[in-house]
Image (cartoon, rainbow, N blue to C red):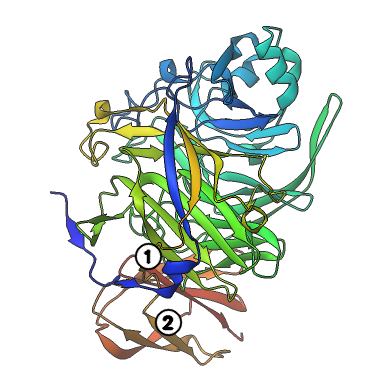
Amino acid sequence: MKKIYIFLLVLISQSFHGQNNFPYDVVLTPVTVSGLPGLHSYAYGQHNGKWLIIGGRKDGIHARQPFNAFPGSQNNTDIYVVDIATQQTWSASVNSLPTSIKEQLQSTNMNFYQDGNALYIIGGYSFATSANDHITHDKLTAVDVSGLITAITTNASISSYFKQISNPNFAITGGQLGKIGNEFYLVGGHRFDGRYNPMNNPTFTQTYSNSIRKFEIYNSGTQLSISNYSSITDAVHLHRRDYNLLPQVFPNGELGYTISSGVFQIAVDLPFLYPVDIKASGYFPQTQFNQYLSNYHSGKACLYEATLNQMHNLFFGGISQYYYQAGNLIQDNTVPFVKTISRTTRTVTGDLYEYQLPVEMPNLKGAGAEFIPNKNLPHYSNEVIQLSNITANEFVIGYLFGGIQSASPTAFTNNQTGLTSADPTVYEVKLVKNTSLNIQTIDGQNPFSVIVSPNPTYSDTLRVEFDLPYETTVNYIISTLDGKIVEEGDIEEIHKGKSGMNFDVSLVKTDLMIITFIFDNKFYISEKVIKKQ
């Protein structure tokens, strides 16, 4: 039976932070665009107000039976151009393209990033006729956005607007692609080949990336190549897929990204709740804070308010382990479809907060959707909107398109995937100034604490002191600095309040280890320990 818990430990409070730091109503208005089908988990680019929509799926969420999951007949084999101002649509089939290009460009959950006029698409998962199997594509394709848009709208040949190279490091689906400085960042995701199987029977192979893969792209004339490839691996904190990668302006003005939630934890099939910041100098797990109201890939909008030095992130519907019901925050470990629209904010001090907005999605929708920003607004190179440079009292920040819509919160869990479909709706997203807003703040702080001693240690035995605000499960993972897991397990006989234990680290043969403690399958604390050999 489905177990639903009212999560009593996340307290709702009327906070100063929620009252004044984002004085806007969020208004969604449906826009009719004829000829645009329902799609989800696609890639997009844009040029001069026209959108380019590539790949994704035409059906709803995937079935739980291997023979029904991700049928090739539901691959999106058309490339769409949308003029949102005139509400017009044009399309062209990918079937005229070379096999390797047309097979990748009809896949789902590709990793993509638009850099100027080039839309870069990496990986993606789909049935490929050439392999006679479902595969994760090992390709990087560069798309000439303006040229392809012109070709499709004038019914000309599209074949000259693509370049493609292969590399096994590109075989990623469900990750995200970003750029900091001159380097592209392929973050998280996994390689999945074969047919999905919820019982983990051998119809597939799966390998999580557990990494940030960095490289530069050379794209000129007929040439496409990468250089300066490197990777950072962490099998604990970077074990993420199907998440939102949020472009950010950090309090010091630095541009970077934040990994928001994602799945699945190593020991349990539940989402990660804490974010991970990514900067040019490295990655930084923010385990002191949990985000509850958005756990899977969905539409999101990122806005920076320079006057107060605050970074705001909006999340539109999707799939989540937590949602509100009659004013109570509910924990539902089936991780259902939700209507929630929420916000996280990073303040000038770097503190993180989460808010439930008073508006919801019209239905259970938003998973696998994309937010397409209004580029006529002032924005940073990573598309973060410059909120303090906008003086209007109401303005359109962009549009939500597509995603999965469901008639039931538990359609996937109950294998009623026929109750889901790809959403054809386009929503205009507008902010309207409202200084009287009083928004509820969710307490996302980590209430657990751990002390590990001695550190450094010359022994194979450490002393670990716990302070637990309530009695719960405690798990641990020991990993090395290069991101490999050495040992994992459960800790028993740890009770509410202060307690301690001797902790054996004899399996660790390196000078530096990271011990991560996981409380209640949701709160993480990582401690670096120097071990003198």
Q: In the rendered view, would you say 194 is above or below 446?
A: above
Q: Residues within 10 Å of mark 2 (few under 14, many from 20)?
A: few
Direction right: furthest residue: 221
Looking at the picture, how far across and down is residue 39, in whole percent? 45, 26
Q: Which residue is drawn at 69% across and 70% down?
A: 252
Lower position in the chain sequence, tag 1 or tag 2? 1
Q: Residue at x 62, y 79 (%)?
A: 511
| Number of numbered discs on residues | 2
Q: Is residue 163 among what the camera can see?
A: no
Disc 1 residue type? Asn
Quadrant of the rendering where the C terminus is positioned? bottom right
**Dividing the picture into quarters, in which one does residue 96 lie?**
top right
Looking at the picture, how far across and down is residue 136, in whole percent? 54, 32
Disc 2 residue type? Asp
Q: Viewer-proximal residue, 270 or 295?
A: 295
Q: Viewer-proximal residue, 270 or 435?
A: 435
Q: Which of marks 1 and 2 is in front?
A: 1
Local secondary structure at mark 2 = strand
Q: Viewer-proximal residue, 332 or 44?
A: 44
Local secondary structure at mark 1 = loop
Q: In the rendered view, would you say 450 is above or below 190?
A: below
Q: Residue at x 50, y 61 (%)?
A: 22
Looking at the picture, how far across and down is residue 463, in whole percent? 42, 90
The answer for how far apart the CA atoms under marks 1 and 2 are is: 50 Å
Name the side, left or right, on which 509 lies relative to 518: right
Direction left: furthest residue: 1
Q: Mark 1 points at which residue?
A: 438
Q: How crowded is mark 1: few (under 14 residues within 10 Å), some or many (20 or more)?
A: some
Q: In the rendered view, would you say 86 is above or below 482?
A: above
Q: Mark 2 points at which residue?
A: 504
Looking at the picture, how far across and down is residue 303, in whole percent? 58, 54
